[in-house]
Amino acid sequence: MRVHLWGELGFYDWERRPRFEVLLAGETPLADVIRLLGVPEAEIAVIGVNGEVVRLGDPGVTLTDADRLDLFPPTAGG
């Protein structure tokens, strides 16, 4: 899965990378992926999966290695 951490969210990657790939064991619920990445839910304002905005609490959102996950903080850019 391709991960893009926008703005200061790149700080939460252990190598401070804003873009990287993660291998998943199969279909994984979005909330589990967020916990795996170590990004606090309170720091995420917008979540995109394959270019579509999704809600963190939506139990129907699962991710696979073929997906792209974008996480945006409340403010990014300037």
Image (tube, rainbow, N blue to C red):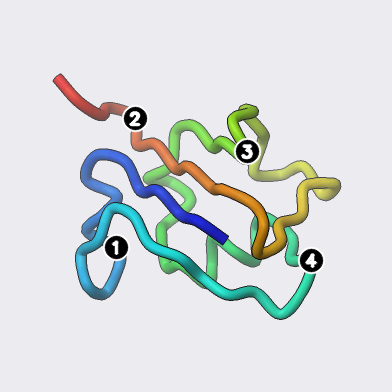
Q: Which residue reaches farthest top?
A: 78
Please report whichever mark, 3 or 2, sits nearer to the chain's N-terminal start.
3
Amino acid type indicated by mark 3: Asn
* Residue 60 image offset from top left, x and y in percent: 85, 46
Please report whichever mark, 3 or 4, sits nearer to the chain's N-terminal start.
4
Mark pair 2, 4: CA separation: 28 Å
Mark pair 3, 2: CA separation: 20 Å
Residue that carries the numbered disc 4 in the rendered image: 27
Q: Residues within 10 Å of mark 3 (few under 14, many from 20)?
A: some
62 to the left or right of 11:
right
Residue that carries the numbered disc 1 in the rendered image: 12
Amino acid type indicated by mark 1: Tyr
42 to the left or right of 34:
left
Badges 2 and 4: C-beta atoms under 8 Å apart? Answer: no
Which label lies toward us, 2 or 4? 4
Task: Note whether 44 is above or below 36 in the view shown.
Answer: above
Residue at the spot x=65%, y=74% of the render? 24
Please report whichever mark, 2 or 4, sits nearer to the chain's N-terminal start.
4
Q: The residue tagged with tag 4: helix, strand or loop? A: loop
Q: Nearer the viewer, residue 32 or 49?
A: 49
Please report whichever mark, 2 or 1, sits nearer to the chain's N-terminal start.
1
Residue that carries the numbered disc 2 in the rendered image: 74
Q: The residue tagged with tag 3: helix, strand or loop? A: loop
Q: Which residue reaches farthest left?
A: 78
Q: The residue tagged with tag 2: helix, strand or loop? A: loop
